[in-house]
Amino acid sequence: MLDCPKQANRAKEFCGCFGATVRKDISFQEDLDLPHYLESINGALKKVAHALAASGKGAPTEIRCFLSAPFYASQTRRIKKTETKSFQVTPGLLLELVDEEMKRFKKSQPAFFKELDGKNKDAHEIIESVLMKITLNGYELPDYHHQLTEEFAAHHYLSLASSPILNHFRASIASAWPGNVVRFHSFAYAFSQALLGVAEEKKNFLVLDIGGEISEVSLIWQEVLLNTVSFPLGRNWLVRKLAKTFGTTPVEAYSSLKLYRLKTQTPAATDKIDKILAEAKEEWLKVFHGTLERAIENSLLPENVFVLADPIVIDIFRDWLKDEKGTILPEDIFGRFCNHGSITTHDFTLMVEAVFCGIINNK
């Protein structure tokens, strides 16, 4: 729970205060199975919501839920309108420009998860429709509404998610706070806005979000989230590889990684893990390079690189990326924008989401 007051200062000077934080782990699955995975997520979400409701901080005025891959799909397209005579940029015109793109995007998306059951199992919902870097006659204007122009151009970011899955998440949250509207965001978009909000005059970034099951590569170019591409090699892939080689359970393999990070294992165990990681590095980088080519398309590779991952494995992935082009930015660029109360814990992802909430709260 976050206290996020409106402020007059700039978004990147935002400072919010966490009133309460709760974390519940999702059970590790040796073989990923969507129904059980969703059941585990919803169970953890219910526990988190009820624990926060019992924290004594009162009911939230807003509830925002952030989705990572594979629970959303997104695209960024450039839209443009040109006339020989000047026209006015009205709300109706903007709606007309984005509405057709939204219809095409929804129609082009296949079912998210074939394992889902029910009549509306293939239904999609648009969760974000955002115009970025708007120009009139080639120039950016802070206030473009009702202005006259002969050319309107913008980048249009869209994200959508599976309606049945969103409804499961809504029901889990409503079990603690009935009647509240839940607003959903893609984490890639939230992170891009938070990063641009706190970065010092930097406009171009490559973001690598290494999640539990999936790694996601995002390209931010000239302050626009141009592309997001994912591949199924996240932290748990690495844990499963260790477990298989050691002939042990994923929980024990993850514990071995913790000891490896702390440099408290025996030399023999360290050498064995080093060998496994060397093989994993080669496999992961091969897929990463292919994904990177798809992500950057015709753009240049940004100098600034940001890596998000579980604290236990982030140094491993940073080490794998050290010979790649670009400068890896430190995580602490977000920390100074958030305060923590007495019953909170520091969580990097929550800090990013808090900065994003502060930015949109001040718009």
Image: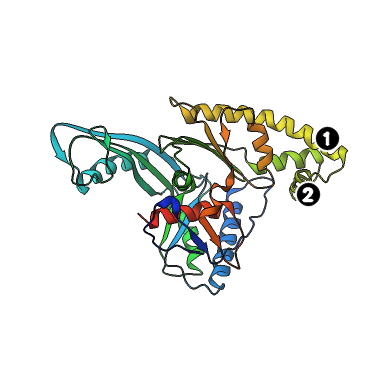
Task: Give the image location of residue 271, x and y in percent.
Answer: 83, 35
Q: Is residue 275 left or right of residue 289?
A: right
Is residue 76 visible in the rendered image? The answer is yes
Residue in the picture at 73% in, 30% down: 279
**Mark 1 neighbour density, 10 Å: few (under 14) some (14–19) many (20 or more):** few
Q: Is residue 22 left or right of residue 164?
A: right
- Distance between the alpha carbons at the discs numbered 1 and 2: 17 Å
Taking 174 as reference, is 352 above or below it?
Answer: above
Given residues 34 and 187, the one toward you in this image is 187
Residue type at mark 2: give it: Glu
Taking 99 as reference, is 137 above or below it?
Answer: above
* Helix, strand or loop status at disc 2: helix
The residue pinned by badge 2 equals 252
Quadrant of image for the C terminus: bottom left
The residue pinned by badge 1 equals 271
Residue in the picture at 59% in, 31% down: 288
Task: Give the image location of residue 343, x and y in percent.
Answer: 60, 67
**Mark positioned earlier in the residue sequence (1 or 2):** 2
**Mark 2 neighbour density, 10 Å: few (under 14) some (14–19) many (20 or more):** some
Taking 84 as reference, is 308 above or below it?
Answer: below
Is residue 165 visible in the rendered image? The answer is no
